[in-house]
Image: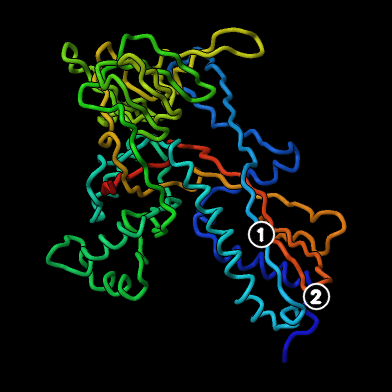
């Protein structure tokens, strides 16, 4: 029998439950900062872990205390509004769910998932160059090894986010043993039955989604782009360094999210800018990846680019806001050296081309927060919360047409809180 006592509260609860069930990426990221928004309004500041270099000997050697903070701002608003007749309102909840609620809250959940990975451009770590479609687990095993080399956590909280093309390529390798070194009958069966990778790859849980972002490189890059001079502007608080380049195209653009590495010059071939381990400060043997964080346009054959992370060879300092004294940031060293004049800058993709991307990310890499929003005054319905998730269900009436208007709303914020715990894997070129 139809549920004729269907209430706004029941509809709201059902909408929230379906939204939670539809979330994919959001379920794999950090949500520990959620409570902070109730205290500070539209943004929350969080502290980065303090790092300190080890000292030896019995004599007291005080280490400088540097507390760095970042902010997450509420910028996301997901909304779905619809109307239905009073006849629909008399439906069983399962009917209303399938016809009105589920399609809409799935769209909201998808928007939230995509809002997280759309921050990909803040992640500098990169595996491989653009143009080759990953087709085996080896690509991601090597990528995970690169993350380990810089000292990221050794735990099981990593997710391998695959775009559907990569998922299909790996499945084809597994199902066809003659072309795959990782063939396993059980894995092949799961792959065939589930329709996606239902097992870990390189020790990481997989998640296949069409929300994995593509990236289009700017048109400035070519094989002769060089660093101009040895003067750089470092901003540790923003985690950026500004580098001036020349020797490349006389015109063109760089795009937010372009990836580069910096090698030595002809005169100083051994001066490649490599990454270092965050714990022992040892050269990893990998070139440090940098991501462009601001769009730019070349003028007169020169272009100043702003990249992240902030380039620190162990000599960088900052100013203590309380005392005004200079404080060493040696404990936050992330590169073996700063570039020399005429160092060769290499983009990880071809100028102007668009590439697919897969993402490896630790749970702490991204953060997602969602806060309660009240229904407007005079409207029926109200907020629904469960397990740290929140949604507002508001309803008004259209008496002329004897219909109800309902909307679901959710206010949220996302950010890349620890970009060093993520990695972009560039894939095939789309254009």
Outermost residue, left direction?
178
Determine if residue 92 is in view. Answer: yes
Residue 103 on image: x %, y %? 57, 69
Is residue 331 found left or right of 106 in the rendered image? left
Who is closer to the viewer here, 330 or 114?
A: 114
Which residue is at a point 40% across and 45% down the rendered structure image?
Answer: 154
In this figure, which residue is indicated by the disc labeled 1? 387
Position in image of residue 39 (x %, y %): 75, 39
Q: Secondary structure at mark 1?
A: loop
Q: Quadrant of the N terminus?
A: bottom right
Q: Is residue 340 above or below residue 17?
A: above
* In this rendering, position of residue 203 left or right of residue 51: left
Instruction: Identify whether 266 is placed above or below 30.
Output: above
- Contact? badges 2 and 1 (CB < 8 Å): no
Residue at image point 21% right, 21% down: 224
Q: Residue 92: x and y, percent?
A: 70, 83
| Residue named by callout 2 | 402
Q: Residues within 10 Å of mark 2 (few under 14, many from 20)?
A: few
Q: Secondary structure at mark 2?
A: loop
**Crowding at mark 1 (Cα within 10 Å: few <14, some 14-19, many 20+):** few
Cα–Cα gap, marks 2 and 1: 36 Å
Q: Quadrant of residue 379?
A: bottom right
> Where does residue 259 sit, x and y in percent of width and height?
34, 33
């Amino acid at each position: 029998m139809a549920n004729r006592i269907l209430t706004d509260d029941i509809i709201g609860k059902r909408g929230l439950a379906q939204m939670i069930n539809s979330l994919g990426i959001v379920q794999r990221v950090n949500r520990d900062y959620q409570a902070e928004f109730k205290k500070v309004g539209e943004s929350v500041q969080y502290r980065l872990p303090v790092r300190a270099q080890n000292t030896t000997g019995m004599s007291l050697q005080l280490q400088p205390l540097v507390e760095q903070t970042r902010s997450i701002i509420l910028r996301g608003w997901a909304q779905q509004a619809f109307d239905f007749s009073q006849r629909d309102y008399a439906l069983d909840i399962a009917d209303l769910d399938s016809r009105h609620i589920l399609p809409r809250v799935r769209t909201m959940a998808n928007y939230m998932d995509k809002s997280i990975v759309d921050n990909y451009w803040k992640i500098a770590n990169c595996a491989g160059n653009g143009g080759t479609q990953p087709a085996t687990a080896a690509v991601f095993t090597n990528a995970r090894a690169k993350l380990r080399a810089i000292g990221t956590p050794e735990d099981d909280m990593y997710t391998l986010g695959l775009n559907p093309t990569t998922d299909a390529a790996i499945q084809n390798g597994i199902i066809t043993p003659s072309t795959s070194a990782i063939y396993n009958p059980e894995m092949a069966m799961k792959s065939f039955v589930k329709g996606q990778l239902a097992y870990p790859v390189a020790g990481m849980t997989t998640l296949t989604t069409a929300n994995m972002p593509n990236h289009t490189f700017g048109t400035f890059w070519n094989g002769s782009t060089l660093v101009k001079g040895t003067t750089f502007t470092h901003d540790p608080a923003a985690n950026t360094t500004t580098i001036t380049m020349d020797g490349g195209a006389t015109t063109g653009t760089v795009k937010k999210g372009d990836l580069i590495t910096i090698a030595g010059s002809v005169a100083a071939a051994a001066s490649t800018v490599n990454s270092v381990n965050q714990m022992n400060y040892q050269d990893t043997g990998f070139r440090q990846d940098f991501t462009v964080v601001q769009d730019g346009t070349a003028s007169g054959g020169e272009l100043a680019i702003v990249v992240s992370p902030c380039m620190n060879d162990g000599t960088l300092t900052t100013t203590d806001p309380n005392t005004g004294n200079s404080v060493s940031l040696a404990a936050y060293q992330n590169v073996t050296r700063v570039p020399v004049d005429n160092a060769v800058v290499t983009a990880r993709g071809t100028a102007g081309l668009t590439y697919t991307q897969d993402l490896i990310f630790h749970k702490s890499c991204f953060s997602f927060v969602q806060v309660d929003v009240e229904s407007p005054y005079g409207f029926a319905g109200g907020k629904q919360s469960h397990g740290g998730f929140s949604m507002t269900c508001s309803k008004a009436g259209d008496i002329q047409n004897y219909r109800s208007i309902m909307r679901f709303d959710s206010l949220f914020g996302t950010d890349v809180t620890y970009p060093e715990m993520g990695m972009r894997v560039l894939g095939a070129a789309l254009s």
